[in-house]
Every structure is written in C-alpha cells, then in structure tokens.
Amino acid sequence: MAATRSAFAAPLSSPTSSLRRPPHALRLITIFPSARAPNLRASSPDSFHVFSRFIGPRASYASVDTGNGSSVSIDEEFDFDLITIGAGSGGVRASRFAANLGAKVGVIELPFSTISSDQTGGLGGTCVIRGCVPKKLLVYGSKFTHDFEESRGFGWSFESEPKHDWATLIAQKNAELRRLLGVYKNILTNAGVTIIEGRGKVVDKHTVEVNGKKYTAKHILVAVGGRAVVPDIPGRELAITSDEALDLPSQPEKIAIVGAGYIALEFAGIFNGLGSEVHVFVRGNKILRGYDEEIRDFLADQMTLRGINFHFEESPLSIEKSSDGHLSLKTNKGTLHGFSHVMFGTGRKPNTKNLGLEEAGVALDEIGAIVVDDYSKTNVDSIWAVGDVTNRVNLTPVALMEGGSFAKTVFGGQDTKPDHVNVATAIFSQPPVGSVGLTEDEAIDEYGDVDVYTTNFRPMKATLSGLPDRTFMKIVVDVKTDKVIGVHLCGDDSPEITQGLSIAVNAGVTKSQFDSTVGIHPTAAEELVTMRTPTRKIRKKDTKVPEAVVGS
C-alpha cells in the first residue's frame, strides 16, 4: 500500500478564493491513499486525496482534493463544513452529496415519531414518515375494494364479502417506516455524516444550538420542510390532519375532509376505498386549484361516481362534540352531524417557527417561507435553504433536486441552479392524475396560439367490469413550434405514464413525433399517439370554439 507523503511548500496564493492563506504561513501538503484519508470516502479503488494545510500564525484553513476532479475547502475554525437542520428528502440528499464531495457534515433531526411535533420528527422527514410513502401504502390497501368490484365481471364470486382489518394495515405500514428509518441512518453514516438528534436552532450565521450544545459550521442548510395547517376556528382541537390520519387507532366510520387539494382528495379516496362514509368540503366551486380545468371537472365526477360526497362552496365555521362522542361540522351553509372524524387537508406552511432565523437576519416571506435566490442561498451568505421550507415547488423530487444542486454549487465547484420548469406531478386520488407542463389556460396566456387534443374513453377493463370508470387525456401544443407544452391525464396508471411523458416534454418533443410513434396495444397510453384531430384550436383574440369531439 502506498505510504502517506508530506512535503512543505513555500507560501503560494491559492487559485480558490475560499482557500485563504494567512500572511507568513507555510503550506503542508499531505497525500493520502483513499483508504487512509481522514473522514473522506473513496471515489474509486485507485483514488487519492491531497490535504493542503497552511501552518503558522492564524493558519486555520485547508483544502482537500478528492482525487475525482473536485476540491473542497475546509475551514478548521468550524466544527463542520456543513450543518443541515432537517433530515428529510432535501436535507439528506444535500448532506450525503456534500460528504461524498469531501465536506465534513453534521445533520440535525428530531427523534422518530409517526406524528410530527416540536419535539418529534425522524430521519426521512415528512415524505418517508408521514407523507408520500405511508400515504401510497394506504392507497394500495384501499384500492382492493374497487378490484373486488371489477372482478365480478370477470367471473369471480365470493361466498362472503371480503373484510379489512385497519390495525393490520397500520402495523404493516409502521414496520415499513421503521425499516426505512434504518435505511436513512445507514445512508448518512456510510457517507460519513454525523447525525445529531435534537431540535436545532440557529444562533448566528455560523452557529447552531442543539440540546444546549453549540456547533459551528462554515455553511448552514435549513431543510425542515412544512407542517399541516388547521384553520383557527372553534373546536379546531377536535380535528385531525394528514399526520394523524395515517396513524389512527381505528378506521373512521364517517369522516368530513375539509380541503380541495391533493392531500384532501387522496385521503378521500383512501377512506372511501376502505368503506368509510366520506364527505369533502370545498371552499370554492371546484377541486384542485392550479390544475387543468378539464382534469378538475373530470376527477370530481369520477370520485362522485365512486361514492364520495362533495360539498362545494362550504367553509367550516366550527366543530362541536356531542355527548355520544360524534362530531358536528358547522359551515356557512348549515351543520352536518354524526362524524367520527373531521380532517383538515387545507394545506401546509413552512416549518420555520422558533428556528432562530429572524434573529440571525434571515429573510422570511409573509407565510414564513425562507426567501432564497436561484441557488438556494438566503440573504445571509452562509445560510442556505432547500425543500418545502422555501415554498417554491413543494414536492419530494424537487427537494432532492434542490439538495443536490446545493451540494454541487457549494462543495462541488459547479454552480448549479435547480430547474423548476416542467416538473411533473401526480395525485394518487382514485382515479389518479398525472400532469406535466402548462395547463390549457396557462398555455394560452403564454403562447397565444395553441391546439388542444382531448380524449375521454371507457377503458378496456370497464367493458367487462360494468363499472362507470372512464379515462381522460389531454395534449396541449404550441402551434408555432409544434412542441407539446402540456399533457394531463386522469385514469388508471396516469402517474406511471406521466413519468415517461415528462422526459419527452422536457426534451422538447413535438406533436408530430407523438403522431409518428407506434403505440403499444392494447393500452390506455396508446391513445396519446392516436389523437390526430384537435378538439380546439385557440388563436389570439379568439374564443375557444370546439372543432371536433374525440373519444368514445
């Protein structure tokens, strides 16, 4: 094995601005084989690390060449090069990438709990513990009811109706969460990241306090995500949020869900599928604000056909509990009684309360989100933020992208802006929704002249099941360039189809390329390459006049 070698070099000016050479200091250069480099992970079996340290009066700066073309500057007056507050998706990605680039990293996270609070959290954050992952597991569990109904048309019969055990589902879900907790711990420790358990609070631009102990870092990254919002109405303490809904001791018999966004609609589908009576209260006259108008209408119709009760233009005013333990929800249109649960799915807000950010001079917006620039840097040079706490595009994959971009920018020598354009989204409602690019109205505002292709059809499975299931698809095209600038789907497998479509849309696919693609038969997705005639042609100053109706 190659030996470690050291040599003295005369004082030199560093080509990197972050490697500041104190006056009259000598530089000690040490070459380590990767296996012996302190706190650094080998990038390959043959890689090496060059550790460059200035020695002499006030010499506290050093740099590491990781042997793979990147260089990290280390300031030895700090405990860490990076401290990350929050070990959710964005925080873990940023911390791991930074550590792999040679940085000394510490990540702060609260103790694990399935329900978040000021004292509890857990490695993996909202997505893994009380968001995407457990939600999708419950979606899977709730879909079997529909599968059972479909199966009758294919010759299946049951001597008795299938029964579901809520306790088993929740126990299995929690076992998977604990497994994932271990996975995330291993991801961080294997990268050399120090895990600090407790609540982190920013003291100043380079200091974070946890459980009374202070840690210093050259850079601080805030990645604490968001928390569910409950409106300030009488009886709000009787309500639950998505946190509690994923870990209830028993399944709701009759539940009121307040909200019209993806969280409210996904839980409406879950509880409806498991047999609960579900009522959804919507402040406006439509669900899913911000999504394509036809998708909004189509999904509401399909959910209604599956037995979900929508109450449009009804806002909650108060919640009361009766002597028999049931809840009543008073709205601007009256009072409904007999609910076992009232859930608020009315959105989330950045979790910046009591983090010390204001005292450190970090700018927050009117809802408490951290204001950042294109590179996720705050107005304080050493403090950065990624994920939902910045309220940009609040999705797990976006937080991952922002965390990776941060690490590349700060520790990888590659200024990298996260790209928030054409981010695909999915709603795991029943039926599910997939969307990428601009809605029809957004496309008209931005491009003026657009062609719109739609189809609304009965999927093959429904021809035998006899159920009223339908699928809706929409393609929005910029007339001048023939580029597909929006695709919106609602029906089985829409999220899976949309992931592939998002690659094409981000690559600049044209409608002609859609048309020249051979479809896969028989699939629902083949409809996307068979829509030849526009449903609408919109031109500047024109109104939307249907020219053709596509579908069956």
Image (cartoon, rainbow, N blue to C red):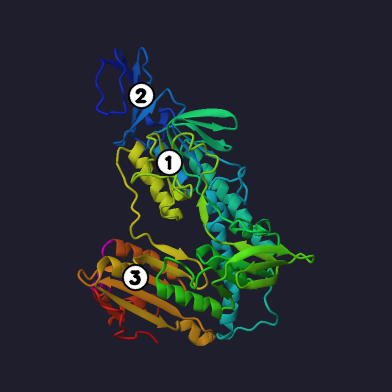
Q: Residue at x 44, y 78 (%)?
A: 471
Q: Closer to the observer: label 2 or label 1?
A: 1
Give the quadrant of the C terminus: bottom left
- Classify 53 as above or below 518: above
Q: Residue at x 31, y 23 (%)?
A: 20
- Is residue 95 toward the left or the right of residue 534 in the image? right
Task: Report how far apart the C-alphas of labels 1 and 3 lie in the structure.
Answer: 33 Å
Q: Considering the numbered disc 3 on the image, is that residue within a helix, a strand or a loop?
A: helix
Locate residue 322, reporting x and y percent: 76, 65
| Magenta-drawn stretch contains 119 | no
Locate residue 357, reporting x and y percent: 48, 38
Task: Report how far apart the C-alphas of labels 3 and 2 lie in the structure.
Answer: 54 Å
Task: Report how far apart the C-alphas of labels 2 and 1 lie in the structure.
Answer: 31 Å
Residue 324 in which image quadrant: bottom right
Q: Considering the numbered disc 1 on the image, is that residue within a helix, a strand or a loop?
A: loop
Bounds of the magenta span?
Answer: 507-514
The disc placed on residue 441 is: 3
Locate residue 35, reporting x and y percent: 41, 31
Q: Amino acid at mark 1?
A: Ala
Q: Foreground: 145 or 370? A: 370
- Asked whether the viewer can see residue 141, the reply is no
Q: Closer to the observer: label 3 or label 2?
A: 3
- Is residue 224 toward the left or the right of residue 455 in the image? right
Q: Foreground: 21 or 321? A: 321
Q: Amino acid at mark 2?
A: Ala
| Magenta-drawn stretch contains 510 | yes
Name the residue beneath numbered marker 1.
363
Name the residue beneath numbered marker 2.
62
